[in-house]
Image (spheres, grey):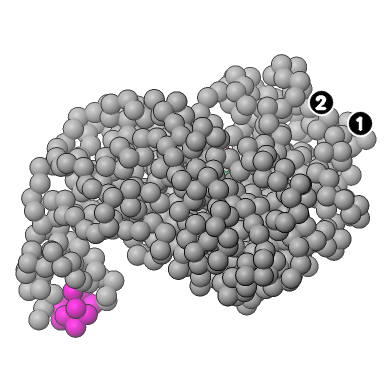
Amino acid sequence: MLFDDWCHEAPFRLSGIEPPPSSLGGSPASIQAHQGAWHVCLKEHGEPMNTNKVPTKPFPDQKPGTSGLRKKVKTFQQPHYVENFVQAIFDAAGDPRGKELIVGGDGRFFNDRVVQTVIRMAAANGFAWLIVGRDGLLSTPAASCIIRKRRAFGGVILSASHNPGGSEGDFGIKFNASNGGPAPESLTDAISRRSSEIDTYSIVDAPDVDLSRLGETDLGGTVVEVVDPVSDYAALMEELFDFDRIAGLFASGFRMRFDAMNAITGPYARVILEERLGAEAGTVTNGEPLPDFGGRHPDPNPVHARDLVELMQRDESFGLAAASDGDGDRNMIVAPGMFVSPSDSLAVLTANAHLVPAYSGGLAGVARSMPTSRAVDRVADSLGIDCYETPTGWKFFGNLLDAGRITLCGEESAGTGSTHVREKDGLWAVLFWLNVIATRGMPADEIVRQHWKRFGRHHYARHDYEGLDQDVANDLMQDLRDRLPDLPGRSFGPLTVESCDDFAYHDPVDDTVSRHQGVRVFFREGARAIFRLSGTGTSGATLRLYLERFDPSPADDAAGGGEPLVSVARAAGEISELAARTGRGSPTTIT
Ligand code: VG1
Ligand code: CO
C-alpha cells in the first residue's frame, strides 16, 4: 500500500491513532518523515473546526528576558496579551503545520487558563499533535526531556520559575526549541520583533479540553494527547543513575528531606525518591503543587528555604536535604551542617562524575555562567578538559551541549545540568549527589571538605539589591563601564584591581556575540566582583553583586563565605558608589 492511500483512510483511524506501518511504500522514505506526513494527513482529514482570526494591537513590552517573558499575572491577564505573545512565538519559530508541540507549566496561578489558550491557538496554527502534561503540568526539565524524546518541533512552558506565584505574583511563558533547550537569542529577538508588529492571532472555537484524563482528543484535526508528566522523565533518570545503589543507600537507613516548595517537583520527587528508590514516606515535603506555592517564594536558597539549613544543623539523622524551585530546574543542596554553594556543587559533581553510570566514560568539557565561581575551572584543569564561560541563563549552554563540547554545566543560582536534557535540572542534581554519596560511602559534608582540601576553596556570595529605580540602576552600570579603563592598578582597602571588563561572549559554535553581560573586576589577591542587572525581575531593577575569593588552603570548618568576602564587598561598593547611588546600606538578599 502507498502512503497516500493509507492517508486517505486516516479519518477511520482517528480513534485508534496508530502511526502508519513502516512497510508503506512511496515517499517519504524515513520513519521520521512518515510521522510528519501522517500528522499532516490527520490534519487534513480531522473534524473541521471554526478558526477565528482575531484582530489585535501590539504590546510594547513583550521582550523575553533571561528566561522567557515574565510579568505580573495582572499584565498577562490583559485582553489579548497572552494570545499576542503565543502568536508571536508561532510566527517566529517556523512553519508549525503538521508538527508536534509540547505544552505544560509549573502549575502557578493562571497556568490552567493559559494552557487552554495555547492549545486552541496551536490547533488554529496547524500543529498536528500536542502533548500536554496532565492538569497542564510539566516541570521545565521534563518538558525538555519530552521534546527530545518525541523529536517535537518545540515546547511552550508556562512558568515564571523562581518568581512568586498567586494572583498577585508573576507569570511567564517561554519557548523551547526542537533540541529541548530555551530559544536562543536569535529566536527570542525574532519573537520580540514579531510581537511589536502583530495585528491578528488565530484561535479555534472549542470548549476546554479535559486535561485531567490521560488520552487523546481531536481538536479540529489536531490531536491533543494528555500524558503523565512524570513517567518519561523518571525513566530517563533511571537510565542515567545507579538506582540500585541509591535504593541500597536508603535501605541502609539513609534519610533525606526534599522540599518541593509546593511547586512542580512534588509529584516527580514522590515517584522517584519515595516510590522507586524507597526513601521513607515523608521524605518529600510540601509535595502538592499549589497555584500560590503555599504563599512561599519558590526560590531554593538559604533565605527562602532556611528551615532546611536549620534542620541540617540540628538533626544528625539526615544525610542530605534538598529543594527545587517553581518549575523544577533549580537545586539547593544542604549537607550535614553545611549549605553547599551551587558553584561548589557544580565543581564537586564534575570531580565525581566518573562514579555515575551516565558519565563514567568521561566528560567532553564543562561550562559555567560567568558569575559562577571558578571552582569548576580547577576541576576541569585537573581533568584536562575545556571549561567554557557563558553569560547568565541556560540558553547559552545549548549550543555547547548540542555540539558535544561539554557534558556538564551550571550556574551560581542553583542550576546544574548535563547533556541528558537542554535545561537545568533540579531533581537530576539531587540524584547525582545521592549516587556519589552511595558510591563513595561518605557523608556529603566530608565529600565537600575533601574537595576543598584537594582543589582549594572559592568563597562565594551573591548580594541582591532588589526594587531599585530602573534609571538609577542603569546609570550605575553605565558609569561603571565608563570607569573601567581607570581601575587597573588602583587599590580598595587590601585589594588591588588587576583587570576588569564588560563581559562579552563569543559563541564558539555559531559565532554570535552577546555583549554587556556584566562587569567583571578581578583583584590581584585572587578575588573577583561581578556586577549585573537581573533579567527575570518584574518590578524595578535588581542589581546582582557576585563576590568570590579563592583560598588555597582553607580551614576545615564549614562556615560560609562571609568573612573572607567582607573586603571584596567593600571594594565593590566603593568602585560602584553603590550606597550613595542606591541609598541602600545593605543588600535585600544575600545568598
Ligand atoms: C536568574 C539567575 C540565572 C538563571 C535565571 C533563570 O536570572 O541569575 O542564573 O538562569 O534566573 O532561572 P537573572 O537574570 O535574574 O539573574 V529560573 O530557574 O528563574 O528560570
Ligand atoms: Co526555574
Q: Is residue 129 above or below residue 136?
A: below
- Residue found farthest to the bottom: 23
Q: Is residue 368 above or below residue 517?
A: below
Magenta highlight on residue 26: yes
Helix, strand, or loop for circle 1? loop
Residue at image point 88% right, 31% down: 492
Which quadrant of the view contains residue 360?
bottom right
Q: Mostly what secondary structure, the magenta segment?
A: loop
Out of 295 and 179, give the one closest to the viewer.
Answer: 295
Which quadrant of the view contains residue 12?
bottom left
> What residue would you read off at disc 2?
574
Out of 373 and 441, give the one closest to the viewer.
Answer: 441
Q: Position of residue 193 (x, y in %)?
A: 37, 36
In the rendered view of the protein, which quadrant contains the C terminus?
A: top right
> What residue would you read off at disc 1?
493
Residue interval drawn in magenta: 20-29
Magenta highlight on residue 188: no
Query: Taking 451 as reference, is 74 left or right?
Result: left
Q: Is residue 22 above or below residue 473?
A: below
Out of 521 and 161, give the one closest to the viewer.
Answer: 161
Q: Position of residue 321 (x, y in %)?
A: 66, 52
Which quadrant of the view contains residue 432?
bottom right
Q: Which is more N-terminal, label 2 or label 1?
A: 1
Q: Label 1 vs label 2: CA separation?
A: 10 Å
In the rendered view of the protein, which quadrant contains the N terminus?
A: bottom left
Out of 25 and 418, give the one closest to the viewer.
Answer: 418
Asked if the residues shown at circle 1 and circle 2 are in contact, with their CB atoms under 8 angstroms apart, the answer is yes
